[in-house]
Amino acid sequence: MALHFELVTPERLVLSEEVHMVVVPGTEGEFGVLEGHAPFMSTVKDGALKVYARDGAEPRIIQVEGGFAEVSETGLTVLAEKAA
């Protein structure tokens, strides 16, 4: 099972792939998303977005600045103001 994850900025599509889990720096605290997570939306604060390709793997760290995260039936989309 895999989670479809997309990271998008106003300039470009940064990442679009199937992953195990993503940990997002939400304004109310970090939250992890796996496949099958209940739908919701959250604002994103500046911080480290952690992308786990598979269970037990070291995360890929992407620094993001502001934005929104949406979990839906199709996966997780993070709309960030900036991503590096």
Image (cartoon, grey):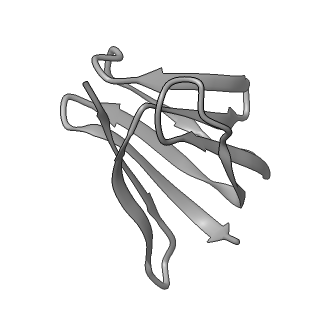
Residue 71 place in picture, x, y as percent: 36, 32
Q: How many marks?
A: 0
Outermost left residue: 73
Quadrant location of residue 3? top left
Residue at the image position 62 percent from the left and 23 percent from the top: 31
Quadrant location of residue 42? top right
Q: Does residue 67 appear left or right of residue 71 in this picture?
A: right
Residue at the image position 25 percent from the left and 24 percent from the top: 1
Residue nearer the viewer, 24 or 62: 62
Quadrant location of residue 13? bottom left
Residue 28 place in picture, x, y as percent: 72, 24
Residue nearer the viewer, 23 or 40: 23
Q: Does residue 74 appear left or right of residue 4 in this picture?
A: left
Residue at the image position 33 percent from the left and 14 percent from the top: 38
The quarter of the rendered structure image containing the C terminus is bottom right
Relative to residue 12, is residue 36 depicted above or below? Answer: above
Outermost right residue: 47
Residue 37 place in picture, x, y as percent: 35, 17
Q: Does residue 77 appear left or right of residue 74 in this picture?
A: right
